[in-house]
Amino acid sequence: MEDGKGNSVDRRQLLIRTMPACALACLGSSALPGVAALAQEASEQEVHRFDVKRDAKLSRKQVVQIENRKLFRFIGTLQNELGEPELLRLLNVYSADNGRRTGERQRGNSPDGEFQTFVATFRPPRFENTLTHEIVEDSEKVFELHVSECVLAAAFREAGMDGEIGHAIVCNMDYYWPPAFNPDFIMERDKTLMQGHDCCNHRYIDTA
């Protein structure tokens, strides 16, 4: 592969240099300007809150799909060029770095590194526009959260990018977030909506 000047560009370096960060940014995104015309008029029937039209006549899921459209195409191109095993490896590397950066950023903005300070980020109604979730265990050392609906999983599924690819680019970062906030914190999970399970069972543990 060559760049515009005829110089050889390593495909792995191309991924690291050009991979969009939008897959994780949607949790706090606002509607994109100029895309309202892409949405159809809302149905008179009751719709799910992920599909409720916003001020720009776009639902939250439509915003996520539009924001990630280029990412989906990019991943498809890389899959064809590199093969799925190498694609998954690189996506996992990328999302692991996102997870570490997220944890470090949260720690830098927090008053302390305590477990309850960390898990407060996930307590409902936080992320209520993008997740349907409930707390199933809440103790001094353990915080378990079950997610039954996720707008990212829904958007990736409709794009045919769920399964192991969606897990690698989105869900994998969750393992690296807690220890980046505090090295004593870990997350355990054996189910994700992205991989086709009935929920995501995030279990955060203070091992100290």
Image (cartoon, rainbow, N blue to C red):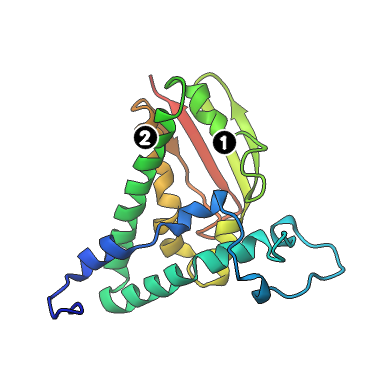
The N terminus lies in which quarter of the figure?
Answer: bottom left
Say whether residue 143 is visible: no
Q: Residues within 10 Å of mark 2 (few under 14, many from 20)?
A: some
Q: What residue is pinned by disc 1?
A: 122
What is the C-alpha distance between the residues marked 2 and 1? 16 Å
Picture layout, residue 33 above or below residue 7: above
Q: Is residue 197 left or right of residue 7?
A: right
Which residue is nearer to you in this view: 142 or 25? 25
* Quarter-of-image position of residue 136: top right
Say whether residue 208 is visible: yes
The C terminus lies in which quarter of the figure?
Answer: top left
Q: Is residue 57 left or right of residue 71?
A: right
Question: Residue 16 shows which numbered tag?
Answer: none
Q: Residue at x 82, y 71 (%)?
A: 43
Q: Which type of secondary structure does the marked residue at label 1 adopt?
A: helix
Q: Residue 26: x and y, percent?
A: 53, 54
Q: Is residue 51 left or right of residue 84?
A: right
Amino acid type assigned to the residue bearing label 1 in the image: Phe
* Residue furthest left as drawn: 7
Amino acid type assigned to the residue bearing label 2 in the image: Glu
Q: What residue is pinned by disc 2?
A: 104
Q: Residues within 10 Å of mark 1 (few under 14, many from 20)?
A: some
Q: Residue at x 38, y 44 (%)?
A: 99
